[in-house]
Image (cartoon, grey):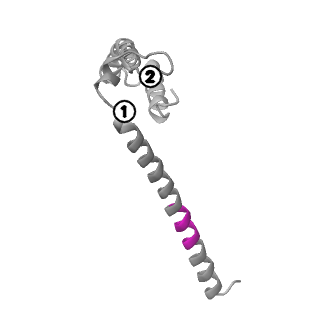
Amino acid sequence: MASLAARRAKDYTVKVVSTGFAVFAIFLLAWILWTLISRGLPALNLNVFTKVTAPPGQGGGLLNAIVGSLIQIGIALAIGGPIGLFAGTFLAENGKGTKIGSAARFVNDILLSAPSILV
């Protein structure tokens, strides 16, 4: 068995190396964030939000992307809102001990455990 001094030396070495890598990773992330802010902030103005995307090489905005995202949110809310409301009401009032209630709870648990970016 390794001596106590050897184990402490290995422990200290691993702590120093892992701390160094963590500091280096934080430095890289801070550098990326600084570059993003310093180069992107001057280009951020009202035209970005009020103009549609122009052909490459010309100035343009993000209006069509923003509107498209809002349309997708509206469609998802129109479909998912009533389903969620009715499923929740059913489970609270009638779903105790029934097969469909157990299935709805199971599907709900699966959807809650999956990261939303994958769904």
- Camera-near label (2 vs 1) is 1
Work out how far the residue at label 2 is from the one at label 1, CA to CA, in angstroms: 48 Å
Report the residue that reaches farthest toward the front. Answer: 57
Residue type marked 1: Ala
Q: Is residue 17 magenta?
A: yes
Membership of 31 in magenta stretch:
no
Q: Position of residue 84 (x, y in %)?
A: 36, 19
Q: Position of residue 43 (x, y in %)?
A: 36, 32
Q: Main secondary structure of the magenta part?
A: helix
Camera-side residue of 38 and 63: 38
Residue in view at x 32 percent, y 22 percent: 47
Q: Quadrant of residue 90?
A: top left
Is residue 94 at all visible to an observer of this figure? no
**How many marks can you see?**
2
111 or 98: which is nearer to us? Answer: 111
Q: Please provide the residue range marked out in magenta.
A: 15-22
Looking at marks 2 and 1 on the same chain, the residue that comes earlier in the sequence is marked by 1
Residue 31 higher or lower than 70, as above or below: below
Label 2: which secondary element: helix
Per the image, the residue denoted by label 2 is 104
Badge 1 local density, few (<14 within 10 Å), some, or many (20+)? Answer: few
Residue 43 numbered tag:
1
**In percent of the image, x 38 and y 12: which residue is there?**
75
